[in-house]
């Protein structure tokens, strides 16, 4: 556990690690709630280290010149793979979008279907304890004062072992993922289809019941004007939409270039007519594949008598949702995983049909908004469709957006979140 505080020692280590092929990196952040700043970087180059003797701790609190050197020589170097957990948080302090060749163990864990890795969340502590068979990991120092110097022995030990645990988790995840996704060329599509058929018969009733319960709870909470119940929270968001021609005329008048793609639906293609072949459009065409289960049956209606939303018993519905959620989650992840394996295998094995599945393709055409706006204005045709005013568009329009306020369509949508489900996102550097 070399703890480096001298600038020359830190620079020498950065130079040494700049020649590495792979590094396991963790950070400790001071004042992460009120004024987050980098305190410590832990770097491990030897994944076989189980004690922390090969973990280097770089003290970079209030030393921006050393942080910049680490970013320039390590983080933006595409030849070095940087393994981190919840990397999106760490790279805020280590190069942001300039950071290259980042492997995030949080994202790796999320790739593994729930039925294979049935954990309540994908936090590093959970992964360490469950997949590395380490009984208990002491995280009491995770919320310690990393802005204070000197750091305590407990803090240094905690920081050291986090890098060791990260390397162990990474190795185990690689092994699990390798088993999850066999070589597509060698997949037995008939066996996969039979397995899918068996699992789907168990999954379908639960999936339809989950969907029904969620819809009944949402409409019930809206009818009772509730934003919060024993099992669910309801939040709303407003989507702003405006007619394409209104937005096109405004951006042209204000000389604002909107760099965003417009999907050319069949209706828009019909309105464009022969103009769709105009060279100025530079249409981007993306192919997508859809897997269809050949023996899939249409879901039968149960014709159940559903209470009026205002009289729904939200407690009973919530209890039922909580009861069937674990089994549904398990089966749902297996269904998705099997479909993904079948689709990849059918593509690699060049098969459009199997005894159980059919693979079909569709194309989506996209064109740049500004190019489309200029073309239709130059020829004098009016396209009739709505454009969603995303945050990006709103920001680019600035005060000009007020000129179209009376023509903006506001659509309120509601999102329901179950309190019984763990949130896997880690927004703090633990």
Image (cartoon, rainbow, N blue to C red):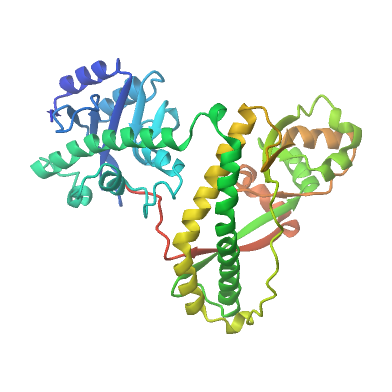
Q: Is residue 271 left or right of residue 162?
A: right
Viewer-proximal residue, 17 or 33? 17
Viewer-proximal residue, 29 or 206? 206
Q: Is residue 282 left or right of residue 417?
A: right
Viewer-proximal residue, 40 or 158? 158
- Where is residue 23? Give x, y as percent: 30, 26
Residue 26 appears in the rendering:
no
Q: Point out the image quarter for the N terminus.
A: top left
Q: Is residue 182 left or right of residue 28?
A: right
Residue at the location (36% across, 33% down)? 175
Eyeballing the image, is 226 above or below 255? below
Residue at the location (19% across, 44% down)? 146
- Where is residue 18? Give x, y as percent: 30, 17
Looking at the rendering, which quadrant does residue 162 occupy? top left
Looking at the rendering, which quadrant does residue 396 occupy? top right
Residue 188 appears in the rendering:
yes
Name, please, the residue furthest toward the bottom.
311
Residue at the location (88% across, 32% down)? 275
- Where is residue 59? Give x, y as percent: 19, 32
Residue at the location (55% across, 46% down)? 195
- How many numbered dots are placed on residues in this image? 0
Eyeballing the image, is 313 above or below 91? below
Eyeballing the image, is 164 above or below 127? above
Q: Is residue 291 left or right of residue 130?
A: right
Eyeballing the image, is 119 above or below 284? below
- Where is residue 341? Give x, y as percent: 55, 38
């Amino acid at each position: 556990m070399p703890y480096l505080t001298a600038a020359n020692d830190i620079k020498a280590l950065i130079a040494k690690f700049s020649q590495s092929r792979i590094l396991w990196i963790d950070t400790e952040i001071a004042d992460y709630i009120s004024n987050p700043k980098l305190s410590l970087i832990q770097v491990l180059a030897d994944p076989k280290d189980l004690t922390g003797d090969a973990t280097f701790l770089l003290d970079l609190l209030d030393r921006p010149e050393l942080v910049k050197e680490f970013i320039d020589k390590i983080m933006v170097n595409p030849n070095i793979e940087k393994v981190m957990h919840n990397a999106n948080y760490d790279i805020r302090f280590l190069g942001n979008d300039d950071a290259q060749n980042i492997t995030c163990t949080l994202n790796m864990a999320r790739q593994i279907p729930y039925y294979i890795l049935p954990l309540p969340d994908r936090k590093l502590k959970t992964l360490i304890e469950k997949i590395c068979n380490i009984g208990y990991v002491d995280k009491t120092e995770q919320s310690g004062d990393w802005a204070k110097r000197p750091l305590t022995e407990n803090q240094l030990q905690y920081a050291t072992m986090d890098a060791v645990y990260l390397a162990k988790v990474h190795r185990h995840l690689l092994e699990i993922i390798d088993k999850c996704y066999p070589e597509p060329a060698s997949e037995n599509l008939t066996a996969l289809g039979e397995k899918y058929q068996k699992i789907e018969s168990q999954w379908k009733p639960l999936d339809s019941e989950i969907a029904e319960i969620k819809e009944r709870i949402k409409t019930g909470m809206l009818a009772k004007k509730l934003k919060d119940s024993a099992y669910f929270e309801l939040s709303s968001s407003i989507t702003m939409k405006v007619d394409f021609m209104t937005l096109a005329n405004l951006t042209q008048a204000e000389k604002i270039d909107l760099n965003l793609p417009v999907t050319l639906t069949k209706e828009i293609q019909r309105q464009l007519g022969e103009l769709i072949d105009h060279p100025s459009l530079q249409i981007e065409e993306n192919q997508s594949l859809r897997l269809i289960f050949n023996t899939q049956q249409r879901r039968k209606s149960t014709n159940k008598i559903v209470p009026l939303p205002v009289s729904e018993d939200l407690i009973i519905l919530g209890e039922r949702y909580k009861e069937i959620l674990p089994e549904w989650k398990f089966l749902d992840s297996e269904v998705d995983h099997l479909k993904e394996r079948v689709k990849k295998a059918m593509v690699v094995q060049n098969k459009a049909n199997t005894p159980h599945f059919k693979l079909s393709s569709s194309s989506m055409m996209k064109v740049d908004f500004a190019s489309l706006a200029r073309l239709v204005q130059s020829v004098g045709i009016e396209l009739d469709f709505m454009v969603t005013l995303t945050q990006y568009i709103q920001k680019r329009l600035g005060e000009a957006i007020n000129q179209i306020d009376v023509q903006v369509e506001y659509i309120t949508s509601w999102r329901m979140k179950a309190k019984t489900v763990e949130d896997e996102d880690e927004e703090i550097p633990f």
